[in-house]
Structure formats: structure tokens, C-alpha cells
Image (spheres, rainbow, N blue to C red):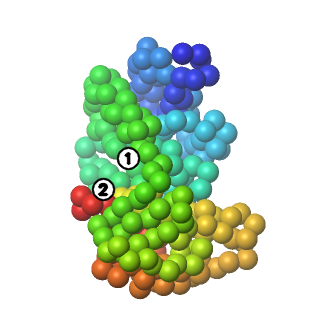
Amino acid sequence: MEESQKPLVFVAEDEKNILELIQYHLQQEGYRVRTVNDGEKVIDGVTYYKPDLILLDLMLPGIGGLEICKILKQNYRTYEIPIIMITAKSEDADVVLGLELGADDYVTKPFSPKQLMARIKAVLRRFREEPRERLLKAGELELDTAKHLVSYQGQKVDLTAKEFSILKLFMESRGRVLSRELILDKIWGNEESLAIELRAVDKHVGELRKKIKSEASRIVTVKNFGYRFKSDLE
């Protein structure tokens, strides 16, 4: 595999010995690596390098890991990049919040490099294998991306273009928390979204809930943040 084709892992960790240990093992496994030791540098670094995966220590100086996670998951350019949190045993509550904000996994210090490499491989494999299916299904709900059709219990559901796009985004991102800002950017686009208020997202989601009937319970409101579409396993 060419160097430019190898997965790029962005590591944000302020403890020098841990950072060097992670970097060494990542390079031994064939990954490209970029590192920072300050929370203030993470957002710009991720935006610039566009990594395949982020290892994010929760206790960074400058901007904390949870706030960074929230910012990245609100940005339509970075929200799909998987995040593995690096935590201490005393940070259980923060781990739960991080997962709710959209982080994909975590490791607890002290961790074995072998365990960390296994988790990285598993997360990358999962993201690469996630299909962009033509037919999306959730309970009694079906969305055909090619025909631009939605049906409930086999009956066509009439949605506006925006409602269709929101439902498609939800179904493709099931289980993940999506902020209102991210939904606004993804559905309305950068320029149009500047003239639209966030409450417009709530209005369209409200109308969508009415039309998909019993499956509306899948759309969960995350207070002061956005929405999450439940997976079939929940």
C-alpha cells in the first residue's frame, strides 16, 4: 500500500510518554500519524489533515476532550470521523457523555498497546464496511435513496424534499447524536443555512415525526443539542 493510502490517525494526548508509546505502535502497525499535545490545536489539526480516526484524551490542556468531541460532531466536515476517547478510571461519567456526543469507543488508562491497536482496527473496519445502501430500513419504515421514496407499512409517505433529506441523514447515521447545527449545514448547505434559524430544524423534524407515525419514537431529542435516530437494536 502506498504511504498516502495508509490510514491516518490523529492523536491528541498531553502526556509525552503515552503519546510517544501510541505513536510508536501506530507506526509499527503501518499507520500514518499526526500528533498534538494541546486541546487548542486539535480542531485546526483535524480540519487540516482530515484523518481517518482520532484518538482523543479527555483531559487535554486548553480545550477539554469532551468540548472538542462536541465541536467535531457539530461540524459537517468532521462529524463522520470516528473518535476513540482516552480516559482515566475516574472519568466514567465523562465517558458516558462522550459516547452520547458521538464518540465511537474508549480505552482506559493504563491500557495495553495491543488492546488499543485492536480497538483502532475494529473501529476503522466498522466504518469502512458501513454501506451507503440504496434501501434503508428501520422497523416499518423504508427509504429508497434511488427512487426518492419513503414508505410506512408498505404505503407511500409524502415528504417534502427537506423532510426526506433529514430522514435519510437520520437513517444513515442511526445511533449517533446529530447536532442541530450539523443538520442545518448538511440539509440546507453552508450559504442557505446562514439565513435559517435553528428552530427551522425542529419544525421540520416535528412534521417528519407526524408523518412516520409509530416510528417517530425512533427520533430522540437530545436536550440542548440535537437528535438521535434509534437503531433496531435499541
Name the foreground residue: 98 vs 178. Answer: 178
Mark 1 to mark 2: distance in Å?
11 Å
Dot 2 amino acid type:
Val
Residue at 44% across, 31% down: 15
How far across and down, in percent of the image, does residue 195 sit?
73, 77
Quick check: 153 above or below 33? below
**Helix, strand or loop for disc 2:** helix
How far across and down, in percent of the image, does residue 188 sit?
66, 69
Q: In the figure, residue 24 lies in which quadrant?
A: top left
Dot 1 amino acid type:
Asp
How far across and down, in percent of the image, does residue 130 sit?
41, 44
Residue 8 shows in this picture: yes
**Helix, strand or loop for disc 1:** loop
Mark 1 and mark 2 lie on one chain; the one further toward the N terminus is 2
Label 1, on which residue? 104
Locate the C terminus and report the quarter of the image it occupies: bottom left
Q: In the figure, residue 213 lies in which quadrant?
A: bottom left
Query: Mark 2, residues whose alpha carbon is within 10 Å: few (<14), some, or many (≥20)?
Result: few
Residue 96's disc is 2
Residue 82's disc is none
Residue at 25% across, 43% down: 89
Q: In the figure, residue 25 lies in which quadrant?
A: top left
Name the foreground residue: 109 vs 51. Answer: 51
Residue at 30% across, 56% down: 96
Single out the mark in the foreground, 1 or 2: 1
Residue at 33% across, 42% down: 106
